[in-house]
Amino acid sequence: MELLHLKYFQCVAKRLNYTQAAEELKISQPALSMMVKKLEQELKVDLFYKKGRNIFLTDNGEILLKSVDHIMNELNKAEELIYKNETTKQNTITFASSHSRLISGVFDKYIELNPQYRFNCEIEAMGEIIQKLLNYDIQFALSSMKISHPDINSFPVINENIVMTYPKEYDGQNNDFIYDDSIHKTFILPSHNYDYNNLIKSKLINMNIRIHNINYVDDAFIKSIAQHRQYYAFIPISMCKEMDLPYINNPNLIINTSIHLSSAKKNVLNEANLDMYKFIEEYLKKQQSFYII
């Protein structure tokens, strides 16, 4: 039983007139009559009977019409839901960032200018970001490190300087204390960003700076803890500027990195996601001076 045959039957049953039904369906009357006849043959019952020049539904035709009306109503509901779902998907921006600090300012500005869009936004570790890009769970990502994967495009947007902050008890001293092994040094690092942490640890090892202890802290708390200034930390210069934190201005202790935008090579960003992607790129480029010394 084909859905098209049911649709044609319903139209004839509503009009009780083959000529009017054929005009509405934009097919010939003989073709319409043939399709209804095929449906009757398939069901092995008569759906209409003639009385004079008029046609009427049989009892079986009445039963079928009720079922067809229900089927068509459900299909119409499904079409509406599918349309709304597709419209929502097309107007939903889906992305992730490796740090909340990378996206907070630009995200607030973008929402203000684009209230028509919806958002699925996540803060994820680099490994999770890669997997979600490859699975198309997110459309693009913003990260403090390049994503190196053959199926992902990762482009540097701006440069960023990472600097070392230190406990306030060493204010006013020269930088020699950082190399003094007798001074107990506790560093804070983000708890979820393994690639970033390995970069910091490698830098400290190369500079022969001893790490006595490491406390791992969630991104949400790093700013508060860094501002309290009890620990050593490598943090972006943008955070130092924002919180007016002193840092060691030694070129050997400054890490030069970039902020990257990434997307899967086979994924074509829809209009909404592409719009925000470009907005982030332009916004960061205008703010470049804030991210470097």
Image (spheres, rainbow, N blue to C red):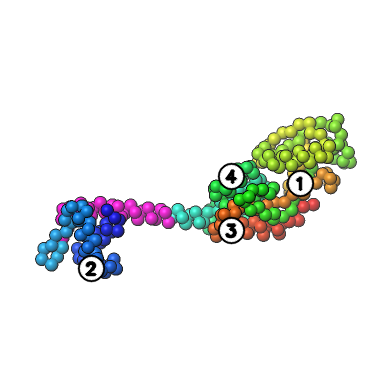
N-terminal of the two: label 2 or label 3? Answer: 2
Q: Nearer the viewer, mark 2 or mark 3?
A: 2
Question: Does the residue at mark 1 contact the one at mark 3 (Cβ under 8 Å)?
Answer: no
The residue at 26%/61% (across/down) is: 8
Where is residue 189 shown, x and y percent of the image?
A: 72, 38
Where is residue 204 shown, x and y percent of the image?
A: 80, 39
Question: Does the residue at mark 3 contact the one at mark 4 (Cβ under 8 Å)?
Answer: no
Q: Amino acid at mark 2?
A: Gln
Compute the Cα span from label 2 to label 3: 50 Å
N-terminal of the two: label 2 or label 4? Answer: 2
The residue at 67%/59% (across/down) is: 282
Q: Nearer the viewer, residue 100 or 45?
A: 45
The magenta-colored residue range is 56-83
Name above or below for residue 197 compared with residue 264: above
Label 3 secondary element: helix
Label 4 secondary element: helix
Q: Which residue is mark 3?
A: 274
N-terminal of the two: label 1 or label 3? Answer: 1
Q: Which residue is mark 4?
A: 131
The residue at 46%/55% (across/down) is: 86
Q: Mark 3, residues whose alpha carbon is within 10 Å: few (<14), some, or many (≥20)?
A: some
Q: Which residue is mark 2?
A: 29
Q: Amino acid at mark 4?
A: Gln
Identify the main secondary structure in magenta. Answer: helix
N-terminal of the two: label 4 or label 1? Answer: 4
Q: Amino acid at mark 3?
A: Leu
Label number found at residue 54: none
Is residue 63 rendered magenta in the image?
yes
Residue 140 visible in the displayed image: no
Q: Which residue is mark 1?
A: 162
N-terminal of the two: label 2 or label 1? Answer: 2
